[in-house]
Amino acid sequence: MSRSLTLPAATHAGWATQRERGSLGGMRLMARLALRLGWGAVHWLLYPVTAYFLLFSPAPQRAAARRYLARALGRAPARRDLFRLYFTFASTILDRVFLLSGRLRGYEIRVSGLEAVQSRVDAREGCILLGAHLGSFEVLRALAASGCPVEVRALMYEDNAAQANAFFNAIAPGVAAMVIPLGRPDTMLRAKECLERGGLIGILADRAPHGERTVPVPLLGAPAALPVGPHLLASVLGAPVVLAFGLWTGPRRYEIRFESFSERIRLDRADRAAGLAASVGHYAARVEALCREHPYNWFNFYDFWQELDPPCAPADATS
């Protein structure tokens, strides 16, 4: 595995109401099977598993995946495109077991844009990492657990954090401690204290729980309602913001991509809404660029655009 890293890292009712296919017990069984038989043996099982999910996943989920692929690819997706999307997702789930248990041997992890974070780490200056359900955020979290010189925490919505903690505890008890659940009275205090200690705070900024404020921004040719919460949180905490993505590029191969986003998200009190919309729009533009570059890494299996139908210009990927 190639590593040039001295740091590593960490909505809609449609996604919030989706029931997970498979129980915690099933995930634990998969983890034990993978760790006992090894990556190579279990990897081949992903092909029939992917075929099964394609056949039996809910029709709205498959339809949403097709609509996304049509936007990202700029053409009507073929069956192989849909299979590839599901297979990439399944591959990251398998890799999660090995990455979070510290079994990084055999993995090739390339890093680009490291300087955007390395200077913060060297200076012990706290930093916020904005990610998305694009690729594997766990590859950053796993590297953080394997020897990052500063504290790393991931902010997650409370319900998701409970499920994630249970799974992480089954294979890597130390990783679960890296999660700070959102929505608790002490959430902001814990995040602020981590940043003051020079730590990194990771948060996925592409989904909003039901009832959270969103703003419509161009994404892949149509308006999508993205949450303002992560941007508002970053503004309140007053820390530098860096985009962070762990892109799956092939079996046991990842590219960690860091990009400077903002030295600080400053919101004018007189026009805070416009400032938030600009920040969310900038984020959406970068997510769009990566969706076009790595279209099979998008793991939002619901329709981002279902509530907002009027067309709009594509996001400016260069902004």
Image (cartoon, grey):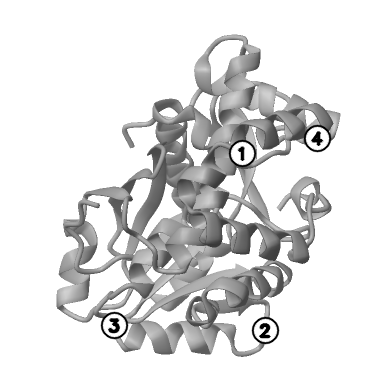
User: Which is more foreground, mark 2 or mark 4?
Assistant: 4
Residue matched to label 4: 57
| Amino acid carrying mark 1 in the image | Leu
Badge 4 marks a residue whose secondary structure is: loop
**Number of marks present in the image shown:** 4
Q: Is residue 118 left or right of residue 219?
A: left
Badge 1 marks a residue whose secondary structure is: loop
- Mark 3–mark 4 Cα distance, whole angstroms, equals 43 Å
Mark found first going from the N terminus, 2 or 4: 4
| Amino acid carrying mark 2 in the image | Arg
- Mark 3–mark 1 Cα distance, whole angstroms, equals 42 Å
| Above or below 48: residue 201 | below
Residue matched to label 2: 184
Residue matched to label 3: 198
Q: Residues within 10 Å of mark 1 (few under 14, many from 20)?
A: few
Residue shown at 53%/36% (left/top)? 88
User: Which is more foreground, mark 2 or mark 1?
Assistant: 1
Residue 45: mark in rendering:
1
Mark found first going from the N terminus, 4 or 1: 1
| Amino acid carrying mark 4 in the image | Ser
Residue shown at 35%/81% (left/top)? 151
